[in-house]
Amino acid sequence: MDVTIKPAYNEKEEILKLFKEYTDSILAEGEEVAACLKSQNYDKEIIEIEEKYGLPGGRLYIACIGSETVGCVALKKIDDKYCEMKRLYVRPGNRGKHIGRKLMEQVIFDAQGIGYKHIRLDTFPFMNVAIKMYKNYGFYEIERYNDNPAPTAVFMQLDL
């Protein structure tokens, strides 16, 4: 199984499908997640996806096995020192194959190349497998750094 990670700027239809699958799956967890997405202006994000995750400070990737798109991740600039990993998602039938790890490694590599000093992210306790992966890569919990209103949100950072 060869996984290819590639820029998604010319794959807008695919990336939007993946973003929708991701948000639908987490919205099933309740109102707290809905409030989080609203605070992030998610509806505007999908309209302005190239601007939010565009070069030079951002990145947007999909993961493919052959011609099948199986996952995605995005990188967003916060400022010259900090960036944020967003929308890391692997389709359920492809989980457990280290695809999320490969997507995350690509974002870490790019963040270092851009010159960021830290990658941040926010997540939820129900994403326990992802949290374990983040911790295995050196992410650690930090104080709230954004407007996410969810009381149970978990905020993490990796020093590059």
Image: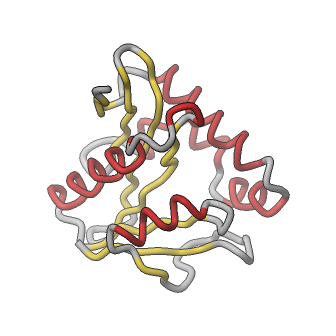
Along the viewing direction, whichever of 40 and 96 lies nearer the viewer? 96
Return the residue found at the far bottom: 143
Along the viewing direction, whichever of 137 and 41 lies nearer the viewer? 137
Image spot of residue 5 (x, y percent): 30, 33
Q: Is residue 102 left or right of residue 90?
A: left
Residue at 33%, 74% in the rendered image: 138
Q: Disc count in the image?
A: 0
Along the viewing direction, whichever of 158 and 52 lies nearer the viewer? 158
Q: How is the image coloured?
A: secondary structure
Image position of 11 with respect to 92: above or below? above
Image position of 149 with respect to 8: above or below? below
Image spot of residue 160 (x, y percent): 22, 72
Image spot of residue 98 (x, y percent): 38, 45
Q: Is residue 92 left or right of residue 90?
A: right
In terms of image quadrants, where is residue 32? bottom right
Return the residue found at the far right: 31
Along the viewing direction, whichever of 102 and 19 lies nearer the viewer? 102
Residue at 68%, 62% in the rendered image: 126
Residue at 47%, 29% in the rendered image: 70
Residue at 72%, 71% in the rendered image: 149
Image spot of residue 68 (x, y percent): 44, 18
Return the residue found at the far top: 67
Image position of 57 with respect to 43: above or below? below
Q: Quadrant of the N terminus?
A: top left
